[in-house]
Image: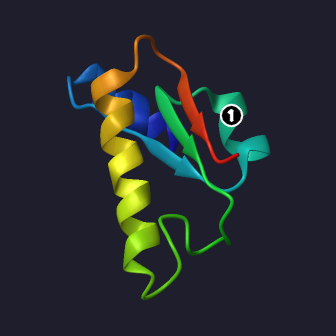
Amino acid sequence: MSLISRGLEAEGIPSVLVSVMPALSSPSRPPRQLIRKLNIGATVGRPANVEQQLETLRRMVALIEEAESPGAVDRDT
């Protein structure tokens, strides 16, 4: 997915990679990355948990709007 993100960015389309497995996603250095402590298959949020899904989307938009350099990471604490 990081390669797709980089391809989109090269065409001027901002992107955020949402990951639940940073050990796999971080080495490929996506342009922006949101690391969530969620289950595989529910990367954006658990099914029917609208608030959790909206939180992920808000954080993705914030990364696009506020990231100051390539490689920006937002991580669940």
The residue positioned farthest toward the left in the image shown = 12
Q: Residue visible at 46% across and 15% down?
A: 70
Residue under pointer 1: 26
Observer-nearest of 28 and 21: 21
- Neighbour tally class for label 1: few under 14, some 14-19, many 20 plus, Cα within 10 Å: some
Q: Position of residue 22 (x, y in %)?
A: 72, 44
Q: Residue visible at 46% across and 26% down?
A: 31
Disc 1 marks a residue whose amino acid type is Ser
Q: Position of residue 36 (x, y in %)?
A: 62, 54
The residue positioned farthest toward the bottom in the image shown = 48
The colour scheme of the drawn protein is rainbow
Tell me if 50 is positioned left or right of 25 in this view.
left
Q: Residue visible at 65% across and 48% down?
A: 76
Observer-nearest of 72 and 24: 72
Tell me if 31 is positioned left or right of 8 in this view.
right
Q: Position of residue 21 (x, y in %)?
A: 72, 53
Q: Residue visible at 20% across and 23% down?
A: 12
Tell me if 3 is positioned left or right of 19 in this view.
left
Q: Position of residue 24 (x, y in %)?
A: 74, 45
Secondary structure beneath disc 1?
helix
32 to 55, vertically: above or below: above
The residue positioned farthest toward the right in the image shown = 23
Counting labels gives 1
22 to 31, vertically: above or below: below
